[in-house]
Image: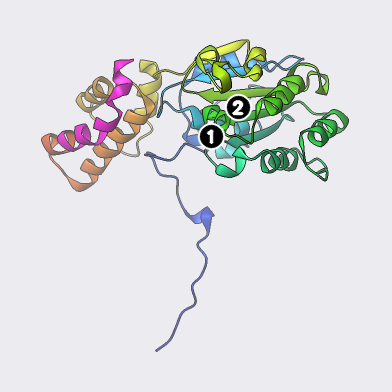
Amino acid sequence: MQVFPNLPISLSSLHNSPFVIGPPITEPSQFFGREYILKRIFDVWKYMPLQHIAIVGLKRSGKTSLLHYLRRIIDVSTEQLRPNQRHDWLTPGYQWVFVDFQDPRMCYQESLLRHILIELDMPIPEPCDLIGFMEVIDQYLETPSIILLDEIGAGLTSPDLDEQFWWGMRSLGSNHAGGKLGFLFTAHQPPEEMIVDDNKPSPFFNIFGHVLNLGAFTKNEAIDFIASSPQTFADTDIEWILEQSGCWPALLQILCHSRLTALEENQSVENWQTEAIHRIKPYLYLLKQ
């Protein structure tokens, strides 16, 4: 019997899923909406010194997807985007660091600092402690750089990221690096409500003058997203999806996926809508906002 070797799959031969349920959106071409929030963010970062931004939103509101879009959209080629999709928010050349505090490695000071320096293509001091890290940033940072801190609440609970660490981050964002270092963090609560050791807010939060709330899409943004389906939905289906989703992107993804699957499998309207309602039940808390 002839045995064929296991050949690697070419990623270029795979197509992006029309609707993504569960994982965050990482490809800019699959990111929709948020025009108001994006304009607010990029308008802040057009000028020096770089200012710091907090994004507040519920679980499944799209915070991580937003961060992936921010760090990629400026430098992505037009061939990788949808027709007429905007990508000229900033002049190319900014550096971006994505930190996911749900990754346990990012909750240890040394591995976190190493990660940031590697992403910024800077020398790694030995030992890679807070003092060495700050000295490297002061000495080598020449390009405007944004550090995106996803789910900062998880980082605040880490014993290794103590108060001294957050004081150091505050100092970098306010007194060092010539104003070329900006921070953005995501959280479920506004900075003033996030309590850490001794029932006090982290000193890091004092530098965040811009707090933006991440809510649902506008109706036009939701319609634009629904229209991206490879099969056109009937007007009655679109109205039903808009009503049931409240224009929240996570619910739109699920409902549109259900409708597309039903069209491909010739399911009845009653069947696919019943299934779709069942699938969005865990996330109905979004509709109460």
**As drawn, is 186 to the left or to the right of 169?**
left
Residue 257 placement (x, y as % from top left):
30, 38
Outermost residue on the bottom side: it is 1
Please tell me which residue lies in front, 159 or 124.
Answer: 159
The magenta region covers 274-289
Please tell me which residue lies in front, 120 or 223.
Answer: 120
Residue drawn 50% across and 14% down?
Answer: 193
Residue 239 placement (x, y as % from top left):
24, 21
Q: Which secondary structure lies at badge 1?
A: helix
Magenta-drawn stretch, dominant element (helix, strand or loop):
helix
Q: Is residue 165 visible?
A: yes
**As drawn, is 127 to the left or to the right of 148?**
right
Residue 58 placement (x, y as % from top left):
41, 23
For the residue marked with disc 1, what is the amino acid? Pro
For the residue marked with disc 2, what is the amino acid? His
- Marks 1 and 2 sit apart, C-alpha to C-alpha, by 9 Å
| Mark 1 or mark 2, whichever is nearer to me | 1
Query: Is 266 part of what is drawn in magenta?
Result: no
Among numbered discs 1 and 2, the one appearing first in the sequence: 1
Q: Quick check: marks 1 and 2 in contact, CB under 8 Å?
A: yes
Q: Which secondary structure lies at badge 2?
A: loop
Q: Looking at the rendered structure, which numbered label has been put on residue 28?
A: 1
Q: Residues within 10 Å of mark 2 (few under 14, many from 20)?
A: some
Q: Residues within 10 Å of mark 1 (few under 14, many from 20)?
A: many
In what quadrant of the picture does the C terminus appear?
top left
Residue on which the image places disc 2: 87
Above or below, 259 against 12 in this view is above
Residue drawn 28% across and 32% down?
Answer: 282
